[in-house]
Amino acid sequence: MGDPPGAFHELMGDLDHPMVIVTTAVDDVRAGCLVGFHAQCGIDPALYTVWLSKANHTYRIGALADTFAVHFPRTGDRALAELFGTETGNQVDKFERCSWTPGPGGVPLLDDCPDRFIGCRTALLDPGADHVCLILSPVEAYQRHHGEWLTFAQVADLEAGHPAEDRQRPA
């Protein structure tokens, strides 16, 4: 039997899943980040899960938010993915650096990334690891373009806005 943690991380690193950009807002505070951990998790009712790093500004705002937008960037959207994946909302207003429109509940909708859905939070699960799980119930969805999704392999060289050591661990 191989080294389970090492082999698992290696196996996951070889997957080339699509990336998403999650945005949300509470009052006048906006947040958004590039997310690699996400998936559909229900058919009837339709549900979607997004995992947010506890190190991120988006996690702190998202813990208070009810409405989220999940954007599906295409291969031509790397600059947008870089903005939301390498900058931290603790230091930079990412939304001053891109075009966006307020959506339901004030959630920022990225104008250059129209393939998206808007969902209401139905649950927030904290398994005690470095990420929390949001379960979203889609209320609106849009697919404007067809083509290649922006994948993990295409952004693997980006340096996260927070180093892994910043992820909060349970005491």
Image (cartoon, grey):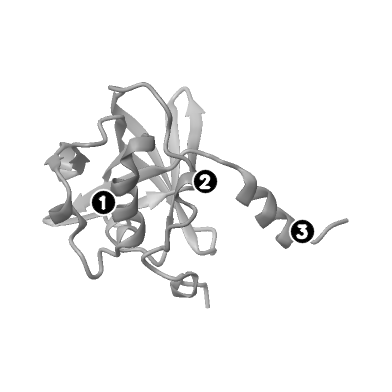
Q: Which residue is mark 1?
A: 65
Residue closer to the observer: 170 or 59: 59
Q: Amino acid at mark 1?
A: Ala
Q: Quadrant of residue 45?
A: top left
Q: Which residue is mark 3?
A: 4
Which disc, if any, is residue 153?
Answer: 2
**Measured along the vertical axis of the image, is residue 130 above or below residue 137?**
below
> Residue 55, image x and y in percent?
40, 67
Residue 72 seen anywhere in this rendered image of the structure: no
Foreground mark, 1 or 2? 2
The span from disc 1 to disc 2 (Cα, nearest Å) is 30 Å
> Residue 50, image x and y in percent?
43, 45
> Residue 56, image x and y in percent?
36, 63
| Outermost bottom residue | 171
**Tag 2's secondary structure?**
helix
Q: Residues within 10 Å of mark 3 (few under 14, many from 20)?
A: few
